[in-house]
Amino acid sequence: MVDPAQPPEPDPADWRSPDPDRTFVARYECIAPALCAWSMRHIGQTVRARVEVDDVMQETWLRAYGKRGDFRGDERAFRAWIFAIAKIVLLEVVRSVRRLHRVQINDGATSLLLALDGVHESVTRLTQRLVRDETIARFLDRLARLPPEDQDLISFCGLEGATCADAARKLGISTDAAVKRWQRLRARLGEEGLGHDWVA
Amino acid sequence: MTGSPEPIGSGGSDSHPDLFDFVSLLLGDRARGQERPLGDYLERFPGHEQAITAEFERLRRDADDKTSHLGPYRIVRTLGRGGQGVVYLAEDARLQRQVALKILSAHPDFVSAEHLARFRREAAILSQLDHPGICDVFEADTVDGVPYLAMRYLDGQTLAECIRRDRADDQVPRARVDLHRAVGWIEAAARALHEAHEAGVVHRDIKPGNILITEDRPVLLDFGLARTDSVTAGDTVTRTGTVMGTLAYMAPELLGSRATQAGRRADVYSLGVTLYECLTHRLPFEADSEIGLARAIETEEPVEPRSRNPAIPVDLAAVVTTAIARAPGRRYATALDLAEDLARVRRREPVRARRPTIAARVTSFMRRHPTLTIGLIALLLLTVVLALALKRAADDARVVLALNRALTAGRSDEQAAAALAELVDAARRDPGERLHSALLPLLDHCLLSYRVPRMAPRHMTNDPPPAIDRDGRRFALGDSEGVVTLLDAADGHELNRRALARGALHSLAFFGDSLLACTGDGSVLLLSLPSLQPSGILRQPGHGVACAAVAADGRTLVIADGTALHLLDEAGRSERRLPLPDGAAPARLQLDASARFALVLGHRSSDDPDAFDQALIADLHTDDGAVWPIKSSGEDVLHAEWHGQRAALVLAYNGGRVEVYDVAERRPVFVRTVGQEVNWCGFDPTGDLLLVPSDRETTLWRWRDDSAAPFLRLPHTHHRTVGAAAFLPARELLATVHRDGTIVIRSTRDWGELRTFRQRMLNVRFLQWLGDSGRLLTAEMHSVSGWDTSGRRHLPELFSGHDVVTTLDSHPSLPLLATGSRNGDVRLWWLDERRPPRALDHGDEPVLRVCFSPDGHLLATATEDGRVRVWNVEDGGLCHVLAGHEGAVETLLFTGDGEALISAGSDGRCLVWDLAHGTRQRELRGDAPIRSAALHPVEPWLAAGCADRWLVVWNWRTGEVVHRVFTSSEHADWRTNPIHQVRGVCFDDHGNLWASLVNNYLLRFDRDWQRHATEDDRFGGALVIDSGSGLLLSADYSFGRLSLCNETGITPVTVDGHAPHDNKIAAVHVARAGGRALSAGHDGRLWVWDLDTARPLLRLHCATAILDAVFTHDGAYVVTACEDGTVKAWPTDPVRAAVDYLGRRQ
């Protein structure tokens, strides 16, 4: 029985929902583990000395949240959109770290690059929880034992949600090869209990 | 992408997500030493050429800035790149010396903590090691966050470069010096590795690329993956389960789900692979992918090094094989052991490594070639199976060949018995149908006959006919060489032999109790029995004795010379002399039964030994005028036979004239000319009938009546003219042997053929019974044969040639069989042939049913005209003729107490007959033909299944209807729609009534007449119950299917999943002892089933459809009646029968 006094629960799949904030949060939470894993994989030791994974994630969230009104698309497009933002954030971080490295500035970089005041507390808690999540750690550990090409393929297709054709172009391989390898990898991850629902 | 984000942040147009991917991939490639040209990246990221080009330049500039100087070191050039970093040639500005500078990564942004820790550990490890085969470390530090390692610079080539160079030149080391050089390098590397191991360091990445060949010695490089013994579980540098090293050189135990930590033996393995590559320029495992390679290393055995480079010495190959053994335990325990063995190879001393055993090599081969192995094993198994099958077929063929030889070539009894014994063995091993089938005729043969091939030379036409002693236990043979042989009549066994050296023997005769009289060369000699020692000479050679004969009492010997007949006693004393007329040329003497008259047959001018132109009668009791001629025709006499009781004899002349000569009247009293040559004729044991066989028939004449027509004609169904014949009065048998080799045994009661068998014999001119034993002796052109006709109970064929027998029944307690034929012939057959068969005077109506009463005293027969006859089995007398049915009677049932007989027929009536008075006791009327009926085991109930689908149960004592049920849901006219007829009815011991319907229903009515129906296409035909087990054997209507049923379920009876018969099942019958049942069908097959297991015990195949079949009373035989008119008795256990026979022989 639906209580008429209570507003209906927004449908996360419906972007025309009257409460886009709650829909956005629900969508983000779905892909946040993948974003966390992706960030952990791409942030090297030197960068991490200045920027933590959760900083990158929260910066990504903040930028996406600010632009949420401009987004139109389905779930797959949302994942790609978030990762595009994350890539730009991380690219900027890498460039800044490189500059800092060259000029031997050892101060913390977060304050210079990121303004995280607007991040909701719930997002912060989510990020902090994901960073400590052992399932993501195990996933990355297994990923690190794969050949580099397979690691990249999983990153593109499994985390970012890119198509095999897109991943194939970036990796310089044929689409057929990318499709077959991705299917094989996905099956192997599934057999090893690593086929999480946040893997595309 | 809709909603694709605009550039965010401060990067402007050069901040695009693809730029990040480009940077990430480029740095990754560069870290692995696989940086690609710019154009390659531009192709991958179209649309961002300008930004990517700029980013590419920026990153290169950063790298150059970072690597041109590093702290106090100036980078000169790159020496090499690896997964862990780059090694540069650098100059130390402080000490002005060249160093090898290893930098973990040119881009510290992407150096993980793990790699950094490993780098630092390598520095620490190298600083601990001090060995000329391990590179020295000068310094380890970090500049601007870039960790580096300064090591002694050694000029040289890595072993990988050496191999690559030689491989490019296609120079696999073949010369001993090249091999020893490689061995020396690996030996030195092994000693250095052992040093590291002793220091607690496991290299974990031994490979040609990490062995530098300097002018002095090989040096181990790159301890970046090395592990020390001090590593703890919490060490994050080398977490347990993390695979380190280069896959192709990695030991199998480091791979897979059960991977272990690398140890010394893993390094030994890697060094062994390195040695393998040095010697062969190939790797022991090769695959298209890393996954395939890992699987090969983990699961397969390495390819033998000598198969890739035969120049490798055996000992060196053994060292390599040991070093790269898949099981760590089979490898060298230490690198030093490897080094020592390599040193022994160089010194040509025996190595400790041993070549793998044959078993190990086979195992290795199987692991390397699993598919081929499976194929080979399958081929081997197939070969074995084929060999066994061929052997079995050969065995069968050998047995069948022996069988054929024994049966057709006239070989000895021993050969047939040997074949039989072999067949018994084979049948015991594999009791298959074929062997059983083969056993039966061979058994038949062995029981039937023996031959005497021992005579030397073989029996010839001119040899005297065999002589048989009075009781038929022995017989004697003589030949043209003067050799006398005494044989056992039971089996033809030779008892004694003697060469008399008197030329050809003319005649032989047993004389008295222990003498054998022999004539030949004009003399008469007496031989003692059984020694055949000469006991007396009655006439010396040259006295002209032509022939001799012994009287029936055996006490008087008559000899004939050219002038007189001489009667001699046992002592050789002459009792009487009877002169012969002038011109007499006696050749054969035949005495009548009273020994008063002698028939003298002679050759006056004839050259044919079997044709006599002289025939004289001599009265041995009269001294004067006692010899006179009796020939009434100018033709030669071919055969003469004395009457058994009277002074008369029959003569057969050439040309077909036959006459009976009465000695008392001294004239022929019966003369007939049959127009065909008669080789034999004779009187029956009664003396009333004269048998005259011709080519196509044997005629029986009442010669005393002088009738113009024969009393009886016995047509020769398959045989030609009779060559010889003999009566056996004691058993009322007549044996005739025909010119085609067929021997026919007839009963003199009804002159019916009892037994016919054919052997390959030529010109049989002698046939006699051997006493009363039932054995026959025949003499033909080349052999003498004995035939045992007394073994009939073992012979399958009882008779043939009569009209078709359609119904059978076996006596409940005696070996007696009743048969009924289409021509109205009803006979009782004694299966052991102790008594002749008895023909019942039945009439001409086709017999539909014969049935013994439960006590066996009565036999009931039913004919097509509806009459039922009841016979006394003991004397064959007719007790009652029961007339009352208006149509054919198909069912006869004796009640359990034997007081009544119930007949059911196509007129729809069941009639109950009082057997005491032969009167109708009750009439139970149905509405349609009654197809089957059954009696309740306890109650006086009769169940009848009718064609109109009604099943009626009467009380046959009172005539009341106990129960009546319509078995179908359809009321169509049964005359036009017979599909629902009730075909089988029976009660079981629990009182259940079973009925099978043509429409494939099996109905069971329990004691409360509750109906239980089962539909199955195995039903619809006859039903028979095994009282002991309560099992019901049910046949289908027309497709040859069988099933076993009881209250709990139905078991299909099949053979290899198929129906046992191909056609309608004509008969099902349960042995009286229970446990076994038979089924016989129109397909000619007969099966004997074990009811406990529903498995076949025996399968027989008749040439034509089987019309009826029953077990004998003891179940030892199955009797079949076939459409070709034959009735055969088959032993249900031919193996046992054969074993019995062989036992008797021994």
Image (cartoon, coloured by chain):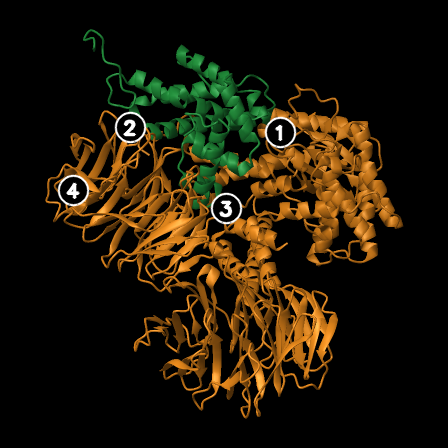
Asked whether B782 or B514 is in front, the reply is: B514
Q: How much space separates mark 1 and mark 2, taking CA atoms?
A: 44 Å
Residue ID at (81%, 54%): B178
Numbered disc in front, either 1 or 2: 1
Asked whether B783 or B148 is in front, the reply is: B783
Q: How much space separates mark 2 and mark 4, taking CA atoms?
A: 97 Å
Q: How much space separates mark 4 and mark 1, taking CA atoms?
A: 96 Å
Q: Amino acid at mark 2?
A: Arg
Q: Secondary structure at mark 1?
A: loop
Name the residue beneath numbered marker 4. B909
**Which hue belongs to chain B?**
orange
Q: Amino acid at mark 1?
A: Thr
The tag earlier along the polypeptide, 3 or 4, is: 3
The tag earlier along the polypeptide, 3 or 1, is: 3
Would you place residue B1088 above or below residue B784 in this image? above
Q: How much space separates mark 3 and mark 2, taking CA atoms?
A: 34 Å
Q: Mark 4 touching mark 1, by CB under 8 A?
A: no
B959 displayed left or right of B176: left
Q: Do circles 3 and 4 both sit on a common chain? A: yes
Q: Mark 3 touching mark 1, by CB under 8 A?
A: no
The location of residue B60, given as percent across then percent down, is 57, 38
Q: Chain of mark 2?
A: A
Q: Do circles 1 and 2 both sit on a common chain? A: no
Q: How much space separates mark 3 and mark 4, taking CA atoms?
A: 107 Å
The location of residue A123, given as percent across then percent down, is 41, 14
